[in-house]
Image (tube, grey):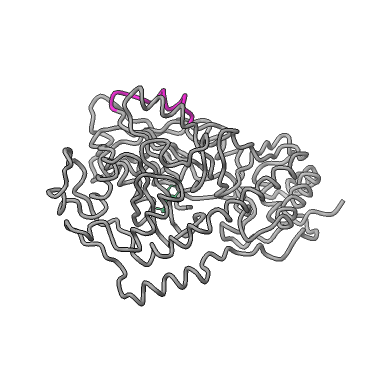
Amino acid sequence: MATPAILGGEPVRTSSFPPRETMGRKERRAARKVIDSDVLSAFIGGPGKHFNGGPKVREFERAWADKFGYRHVITCNSCTSGLVLAVGAAGVGPGDEVICTPYSMSASATCPLFYGGVPVFADIDPDTFCLSPKSVERRVSDRTKAIVVVHLFGQPADMDAINEIADEHDLVVIEDAAQSPGATYRGKPVGTIGDIGVFSLNFHKHIHTGEGGVIVTDDDTLARRCRLIRNHGENSVGASDLDDLANTFGGNYRLTELQAAIGTEQLRRLDGYLDTRRRLAEHLRERLEDVAGIYVPDCREDRTHCYYVCPLKYDSERAGISRSMFVRSVLAELPAPGDFESTPVTEGYVEPLYLLPVFQEKLAMGGAGFPFNYSDDVEYDYSRGLCPVTERLYEEELLLSPIVREPLVERDINDFVVAIYKVVENSSRIRAELTNEGEVFTPVEAANTSRP
Ligand SMILES: *Cc1c(COP(=O)(O)O)cnc(C)c1O
C-alpha cells in the first residue's frame, strides 16, 4: 500500500486546481460602455425619475426579475445591506426579536441589530444545515417579529413548515439566499417563498459584481419601503403614499451603473455554473458511496441545490481517524494553496454565531447593552450549548469542499476521491505513527466568521 503523503510518501497530485475566471469579454465590453458613457451612477437621493437609479441598474433589475419571475427586484451594494433593508422594510424596531440561524455568515444574524432588533438563535437540521422548524417554533415569543432563513451552502430550507409558523404568529419571513441563486423549493425559485429574499453579488459568490446585493419580493409595500431605505428615503417619503414611515429614513445602499452592467452579463452565466456544480457534486457523492464514515448528504427531493460549496458528513469512528487528522492527511495528498476556493476540504463552517463577541459581550449599539437589555422581562442566552446540533457539526461532523466548481472537471474530483481513499485505507497507520511521534493536532480552523 502506498505510503500516505503525510508520512512522507508521494502525494496523489501536485498541480494546483485551476482558479475561477469570472470576468470575460462580455463583462469587459459592458463595463467599457458604461465608462464611455461617463455615467457611473445615475441615482439622485430625492423625488424624480432618478430616484430608482439609472438605465443599467434598472436593466439589471428587470433581467433578474424576468429570469426567475419575481415581481419586484431592488439591487443594493451588498447582501449585508440587503438584509438590513429587508429587516427595516419588515418594520423591525427596538426590542423586537428576530429568529436567526447560528450557522451562517455573520450578517445573517447581525442584520436585526441595525434597527434595534434582538437576534434569537434557533438550531439547525443536521442534514440540510438550515433552520429546524421545530427549533424555530420553540423560540417564538410574543416579541418575535421576523425570521431570517438561510438557504445554506445552496440548499433551500424547510420553507413550508417555516411559513406555517410565520402565518400562525404573524411573522415576516426573510430569506438569506446569498449562497443559493437559482435554487428551487417545490419548483419555485428561492427568495419569494417567504416574504422577501436577498442574494449576494460578492466576489466569492456564484456570480458577482465585486460587491453587490439583490433584494426580491412579491409584496408591493415591502418593495416600496426597500427602495426608500436604499436611497435616503427621508428626502422622498413626502412624495410617497406610504402610511407607515417607520424605518424609511434610509441611507445610501445603491449599486453603481458599472456593477449593474457587469451583473447583467454575469446573470447569463449562472445556469452554466449551476450545471457544473451539480454535476461535480453528484460525481463526488457517487464516488464516495463505498467509503466508510464520509458522505455527501442527499439534497431533499422537493428542492434543487446550488452547491455554493459541497457539504460532507464525517464520522470519525467509522473512518478510523479524527476529523482534523483526516483533513491534514488529505491536504497533504493534494495542492492546497491556502485560498478558500482551491483548498479541497476544510473542517466545519463558521463558529456558531452566538459565540461572536457582539453576543457574548452583549455590546451592539453603544456601550450600555442595547438592544439586549431593551426589555426588563427577558434575559437573552447566548451561552455555549445553546444549539447542540450546530455545535456538533462545527466541532465534529461537517466537512466542506469548495472544489465542486467551474472550471474543474470530473478528473479533478477523482483526485480528491483517490486522496480520501488513500487516507481512509491507511487510517490506522497514520493514527499510530503520528500519535507515536507525539504530534499534537489542533483543528484546522476551517473558517472564521468573515468567511463568505
Ligand atoms: C456572503 C453571504 C452574506 C453577505 O453577503 P455580502 O454581499 O458579502 O454582504 C450573507 N449571508 C450569507 C449566507 C452569505 O454567504
Q: Which of 28 and 316 lies nearest the eye of the viewer?
A: 28
In the rendered view, does 413 fall on the left or right side of 264? right
Q: Which of 122 and 32 lies nearest the eye of the viewer?
A: 32
Q: Which of 367 and 337 lies nearest the eye of the viewer?
A: 337
Q: Residue at x 34, y 44 (%)?
A: 111
Question: Quarter-wise, where is residue 20 in the image?
Answer: bottom right
Most extreme residue toward the right is 1
Query: Which residues lie in the magenta part?
Result: 132-143
Question: Quarter-wise, where is residue 243 in the image?
Answer: top left
Q: Residue at x 23, y 33 (%)?
A: 374
In the rendered view, does 439 fall on the left or right side of 270? right
In the rendered view, does 323 fall on the left or right side of 449? right
Residue 80: horizontal and vertical position, in percent?
37, 50
Residue 172: horizontal and vertical position, in percent?
33, 33
Q: Which of 193 and 16 lies nearest the eye of the viewer?
A: 193
Residue 264: horizontal and vertical position, in percent?
43, 60
Q: Residue at x 51, y 40 (%)?
A: 184
In the rendered view, does 4 fall on the left or right side of 128? right
In the image, residue 452 lies in the stretch drawn in magenta:
no
Please tell me how many numbered marks the rendered image carries. 0
Most extreme residue toward the bottom is 36
Most extreme residue toward the left is 238
Residue 346: horizontal and vertical position, in percent?
60, 49
In the image, residue 142 lies in the stretch drawn in magenta:
yes
66, above or below 378, in the image? below
211, above or below 27, in the image? above
374, above or below 208, in the image? above
